Image: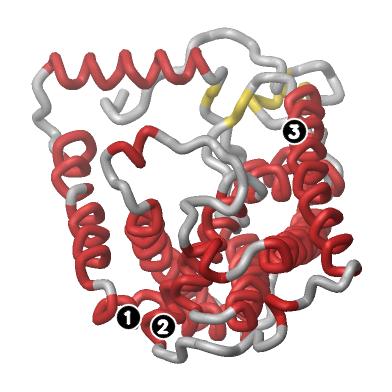
């Protein structure tokens, strides 16, 4: 057996699907997730602390309230297009053998809790706006920064709050009628998140002035991670992560376009309109290139992070003559993770 793959233990997980004659057809995922479960998964993964941290970064690089709101809307649309493109490329590589339906109910509960918290902020802001407090919107485009590099950095902060738009691909096989429900779930969840985020930012801007937002590390109470003890400016960290993510997203969507060109007749259960991946690719290239001259340090660190993966790949994957202690250690670590997360390899059938 190759040293890269840990052997599956001879236990029968709850995800084994039996055939009509009660004979096992192998390890398969149960299709227990419906359309609204898929919507809850996407919304629940996306909505998090980012909406309380990113507004400052968006406003800082946008220069005005009006452009900041445009960036939030644009980031939502871009995430929607990206999610649809990823749906065409989506693959599943591992199986979680816990009760998926039970886990989804927990996910639904936390999703509802987070949405409820944001709705309180939105309602409070709209009430304040209804009472006539419009002074922060008198000149919404004043101070707008039109420099392409800073627009890209503003989008970085916006996209940081939308992170997770591609995660439903990881449970595609657990979706009922995935070829219909996957794109439907994306087209429902991303607009919902976008609307909530835009109104949340309107609520922020109604209550706080631009200077007050820029003077704070977060526009609402949130937990500051241990990373901030090392990197004091969270927006530098966001730029690190966003540059790397934008680069790999560009490579992924270029793969989709390449497959469309080289294998136009390939069966595609989910196929997006060709203009969507083209537009998405152009925007991703913009997001990768233009920050290079306005934020070269963050881009440089991002490139170093990417290149650091090369020796890791060579040591743990490509190196055939690995010493026994490294093979055994890697195997034991993989098995421990598999047992902890109840994961097994899927049985592939032709």
Residue 334 point in image, percent of width and height: 37, 21
The quarter of the displayed image where residue 251 is located? bottom left
User: Who comes first in sequence, dot 3 or dot 2?
Assistant: 3
Q: Is residue 335 visible?
A: yes
Residue 348 point in image, percent of width and height: 57, 37
Figure check: 335 above or below 311: above
* Residue toward you, 45 or 122: 122
Q: Which class describes the residues within 10 Å of circle 3: few (<14), some (14-19), or many (20+)?
A: some
The residues tagged by marks 3 and 2 sit, at their Cα atoms, a distance apart of 35 Å
The residues tagged by marks 3 and 1 sit, at their Cα atoms, a distance apart of 37 Å
The quarter of the displayed image where residue 152 is located? bottom left
Residue placed under numbered mark 2 in the picture = 286
Residue placed under numbered mark 3 in the picture = 110
Q: Which class describes the residues within 10 Å of circle 2: few (<14), some (14-19), or many (20+)?
A: some
Q: Is residue 268 visible?
A: no
The circle drawn on residue 264 is none
- SS class of the residue under badge 1? helix
The residues tagged by marks 2 and 1 sit, at their Cα atoms, a distance apart of 5 Å
Report if the CB atoms under discs 3 and 1 are less than 8 Å apart.
no
User: Who comes first in sequence, dot 3 or dot 1?
Assistant: 3
Report if the CB atoms under discs 2 and 1 are less than 8 Å apart.
yes
Residue placed under numbered mark 1 in the picture = 289
Q: Residue at x 51, y 58 (%)?
A: 160
Q: Which class describes the residues within 10 Å of circle 1: few (<14), some (14-19), or many (20+)?
A: some
- SS class of the residue under badge 2? helix
């Amino acid at each position: 057996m190759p040293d890269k793959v840990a052997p599956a233990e001879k236990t029968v997980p709850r995800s084994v699907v039996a055939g009509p004659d009660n004979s096992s057809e192998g390890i398969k995922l149960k299709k227990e997730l419906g359309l609204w479960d898929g919507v809850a998964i996407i919304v629940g993964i996306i909505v998090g602390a980012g909406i309380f941290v990113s507004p400052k970064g968006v406003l800082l690089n946008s220069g005005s309230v009006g452009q900041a709101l445009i960036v939030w809307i644009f980031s939502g649309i871009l995430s929607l297009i990206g999610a649809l493109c990823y749906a065409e490329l989506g693959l599943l590589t591992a199986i979680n053998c816990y009760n998926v339906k039970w886990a989804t109910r927990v996910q639904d509960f936390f999703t509802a809790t987070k949405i409820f918290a944001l709705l309180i902020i939105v309602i409070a802001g709209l009430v304040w706006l209804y009472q006539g407090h419009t002074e922060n919107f008198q000149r919404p485009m004043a101070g707008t920064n039109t420099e392409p590099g800073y627009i890209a950095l503003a989008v970085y902060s916006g996209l940081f709050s939308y992170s997770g738009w591609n995660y439903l691909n990881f449970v595609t096989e657990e979706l009922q009628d995935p070829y219909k429900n996957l794109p439907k779930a994306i087209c429902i969840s991303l607009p919902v998140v976008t609307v909530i985020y835009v109104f949340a930012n309107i609520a922020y801007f109604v209550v706080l002035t631009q200077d007050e937002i820029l003077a704070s590390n977060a526009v609402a109470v949130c937990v500051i991670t241990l990373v901030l003890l090392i990197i004091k400016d969270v927006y530098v960290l966001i730029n690190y992560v966003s540059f790397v993510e934008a680069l790999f997203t560009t490579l992924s969507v270029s793969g989709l376009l390449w497959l469309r060109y080289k294998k136009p007749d390939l069966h595609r259960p989910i196929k997006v309109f060709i203009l969507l991946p083209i537009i998405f690719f152009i925007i991703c290239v913009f997001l990768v290139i233009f920050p290079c001259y306005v934020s070269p340090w963050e881009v440089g660190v991002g490139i170093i992070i990417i290149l650091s993966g090369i020796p890791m790949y060579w040591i743990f994957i490509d190196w055939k003559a690995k010493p026994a202690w490294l093979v055994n250690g890697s195997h034991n670590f993989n098995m421990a993770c598999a047992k902890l997360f109840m994961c097994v390899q899927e049985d592939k059938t032709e």
